[in-house]
Image (cartoon, grey):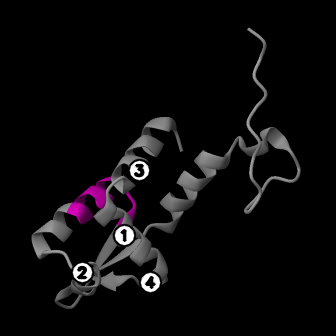
Amino acid sequence: MKAPAALETLDALAHATRLAAFRALVVAGAEGLAVGELREALRVPPATLTAHLNVLRAAKLVLDRREGRSIVVRANFARMNDLVAYLTENCCAGATSCGPGVICPPAPRSAP
């Protein structure tokens, strides 16, 4: 992932309702949720959810499919993993102890 795509993805998640929607879809897993189920879980009006889902779709964070009369949305785990990889690619500057749960120390500052 390049910086512009990371910024677009982070921007899409930088809203409470969109972040809550994405997190709910992550919890739902590969099966996703019908849009109506997601709307009920988030307690938002249909038009509001549609607008938020369109932002998440544009950032490639959600995918959808039609099942009969319902639209099922699911998290795009590949995109999520790409973002996490981008955010952590320089973690610990190559130290062997870097990974989940490890706090990366700040890089040393060069002398002025």
Reply above or below: 22 against 57. below
Boundaries of the magenta span? 52-62
Q: Nearer the viewer, mark 2 or mark 1?
A: 1
Residue 28 tag number:
4
Q: CA distance from mark 3 to mark 4?
A: 20 Å
Q: Which residue is mark 3?
A: 9
Is mark 3 in CB contact (under 8 Å) with mark 2?
A: no
Say few, some or many: other residues with alpha carbon within 10 Å of mark 2 (under 14 / 14 to 19 / 20 or more). some
Q: In this figure, which residue is indicated by the disc labeled 2? A: 35
Secondary element at image label 4: helix
Q: Nearer the viewer, mark 1 or mark 4?
A: 1
Residue 110 x, y percent position in the rendering:
77, 17
- Which sits earlier in the primary sequence, circle 2 or circle 1? 1
Among numbered discs 3 and 2, the one appearing first in the sequence: 3
The disc, 3 or 1, on the residue closer to the chain's N-terminal end is: 3
Q: Amino acid at mark 3?
A: Thr
